[in-house]
Amino acid sequence: MTIDLEALYIDLHRHPELSFQETRTAGVITRHLEELGVEFEEGIGRTGVVGGIRNGEGPVVWLRADMDALPVPEQTGLEYASTARGVDPAGTEVPVMHACGHDMHVAALLGAVERLVATKDEWSGTVVAVFQPAEEYGAGSQAMIADGALDRFPKPDIVLGQHVTPLPAGTIGVRSGTQMAASDGLTVTLLGRGGHGSRPQATIDPVVMAAATVMRLQTVVSRETDPRDVAVVTVGSIHAGLKNNIIPAEAKLELSLRYPDDEARARVLEKVERIVRAEAQASGAEQPPVIAVDHSLPPTINDVHATARLVLAFDAAFGDGTVIDPGMFTGSEDVSWFARESGAPLVFWFWGGADPEAYAAAQAAGTIERDIPTNHSPFFAPVLQPTLGRGVDALVVAAREFLAAPAR
Ligand SMILES: [Zn+2]
Ligand SMILES: [Zn+2]
């Protein structure tokens, strides 16, 4: 019996679940692992599932897929588009969509597990399939590790993972060294003094303070960062006040910061903090602003030797020209905690999900940024094939590259 992977993907796409709520998804996964005769444990890091294929002596290869979806209203127009709703941690009902393609990751990993089980006589070693919750919170891999994922299963000799992305379907993008940026999520609370909207002189207006802060923060990258360096400062959320004639007492900003390494991180954080404090002071704030780091993700660094091996293996399997260097992505991932905590090398690659014809047309017209929806867009929709097939093949090729040949 073989898994109908396309049906599986469509089912997952129709039933997306928010971070740490992936119970139905975990159920789909465990049902298939059971059918494949793969031993597994569930509920690791709340909703995570880990399956292990022990197949004699040899290296331990971890294959990781994340499972969670996002509070995004799907607008792809696909026949299998999600209409799901969920409840976010604040208790708000939100639309839910697999807008980052993690449904594709789960389907591809299950397909790879099936193939590796079916070809056990061709390899030797242990494959650990990690289905991770809550990547979008940057918290799932650490939750699994805190729950003993690295102790309850054979420790990895290498950690491998992949992410679907709007490259042309069929293409694989992987970069030696820093593949994805480090990131920090900050909440900045600016403290003013509230009062009547008609008497601004009696208040310290946190709305104006916030506006000035947001504008000045733009200079961290544009004026204070070497143009050859990568850094991002995004203020993704700004909240203050409830009514036009009340000057509120405080304003909250949520920032997303990105950089390639710890040195750049320290530099950007220092500048952000300086500007936030100085703008508060410029407004005459009576209390300094409160700056909290909500989450912190390390850079995703691909092991140089393992990446070189893998690129050769991909070239041999898929033909020259399949693998490109996509450059460093300013997105961030929590996959590397598995490698960092275990001391194993990591290779994390991207694989294309965009319609190759649409991509070529957009490229010719110079409109890729406008016309090819990216991850987290309500229009993000990987073409089913060859995306799914390539995702399975890439995992199998990669796993086999690092597993041993069978004992004779
Ligand atoms: Zn995402
Ligand atoms: Zn993602």
Image (tube, grey):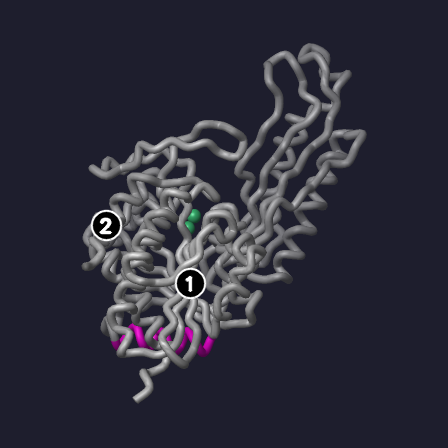
> Which residue is tagged 1?
327
**How busy is the neighbourhood of tag 1: few (under 14 within 10 Å), some, or many (20 plus)?**
few
> Mark 1 falls on what kind of element?
loop
- Residue 244 placement (x, y as % from top left): 59, 14
Task: Report the residue that reaches farthest toward the bottom.
Answer: 408
Left or right of 187 in this view: 287: right
- Residue 111 placement (x, y as % from top left): 27, 60
Amino acid type assigned to the residue bearing label 2 in the image: Val
Q: Earlier in the sequence, mark 2 or mark 1?
A: 1
> Which residue is tagged 2?
383
Label disc, if present, on residue 289 of the rendered structure: none
Q: Which residues are magenta?
A: 304-316
- Residue 28 placement (x, y as % from top left): 32, 48
Q: CA distance from mark 2 to mark 1?
A: 23 Å
Left or right of 94 in this view: 200: right
Q: Is residue 97 magenta?
A: no
Q: Residue at x 35, y 64 (%)?
A: 173
Residue 165 seen anywhere in this rendered image of the structure: no
Q: Residue at x 40, y 49 (%)?
A: 67
